[in-house]
Amino acid sequence: MLQQTQVATVLNFYPKFLTKFPTASALAAAPLDDVLALWSGMGYYTRARNLHRAANQVMQDFGGEFPKSAEQLEALVGVGRSTAAAIAAFCYGERVAILDGNVKRVLARVLAFDGDLAKASEVNLLWDKATKLLPTKNLKITMPAYTQALMDMGATLCHARAPDCAKCPVASLCEAYRNKACEAYPVKTKKLKRSTESIWLLHATTLHGDVLLQQRPMDGASKVWAGLYSLPPFESEAALLSSLPKVAHKKLVFAPVLKHVLTHKDLWLHIVQLDVSAQSKLAHLGAWHSVSKALQLGLPAPIRKFLETAQ
């Protein structure tokens, strides 16, 4: 949950999630829909799908016993080298280095490492340096403490902009601080380009207030909202109109366009409202749900917010 999401946000989800799925076996046995429903609103839903798959791996490939080494942990879906190292260091005291964004910044500054971290070869070189700096004694105690300290320094002191060097416990060891060049590190030349995508959404409701939802496929041309429930989506206004009988076109109400910001993409949501007389209408586009039932499903954040305000 803490990958790409701040602690304050995660604290709103973690207790409920752990209560519902206290063990790997409970998570593995649960339907994916239930997992996505509890994740709904936190974003980056690939994490939830991967976590569910990883729980099944633990049960099937590891006999229900959670892996106890970084090497084995990397075999789990969605667990990369740094996450595997963090689990192994915290839980088992294994001598392995983490290298998330905050730690890269701390180490690059302390070492004045000027390799371009947009290049895999330079990242691997920094990883080698990070490994050499690890504690060598009393690892059950020192590895969790050292790993937590690096993460906390990056999160609270060694900011990307305006680092608080006066409070830094390793300022005297920091080459970037000594050279008054903290903001020159880390070096990363490649910039991710933002993209945009327009989605047309049909907000169909019955006289009783039921809403039409469609579960998004797990694969397809667009990975947006895979596996989640959404108002029926279309790639264009023309595609939406062609899915409806012509007699319904005059009843359509076009809501103001909504902008939803993802990490590397802006979504422009064109919501088109339509009241129908009975649930038998539009069955080819999804399934009807009461709004209260809909809000218990795994919904993308903007769809959830829209349904809550539309009541």
Image (tube, grey):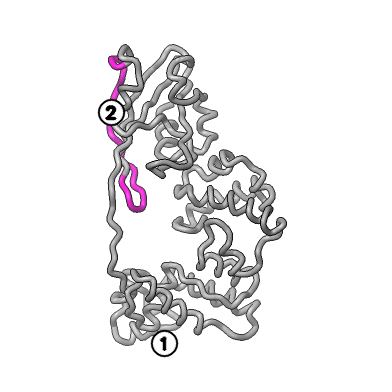
Q: Which residues are magenta?
A: 249-266
Instruction: From this view, report whether residue 181 is shown above or below residue 159.
Output: below
Q: Pointer 1: what residue?
A: 173
For the residue pair 128 and 258, the one nearer the viewer reads as 128
Query: What residue sits 50% from the left and 72% below the top?
Result: 98
Q: Secondary structure at mark 1?
A: helix
Comes first in the chain, label 1 or label 2: 1
Q: Position of residue 14 (x, y in %)?
A: 57, 51
At label 1, the amino acid type is: Leu
Q: Quadrant of residue 219?
A: top left
**Dividing the image into 4 quarters, which one contains the C terminus?**
top left
Q: Position of residue 91 (x, y in %)?
A: 64, 68
Sort mark 2 into few (<14), some (14-19) or many (20+) by Cα contacts within 10 Å. Answer: some
At label 2, the amino acid type is: Glu
For the residue pair 174 and 196, the one nearer the viewer reads as 196
Instruction: From this view, report whether residue 258 is shown above or below residue 135.
Output: above
Q: Position of residue 5 (x, y in %)?
A: 45, 55
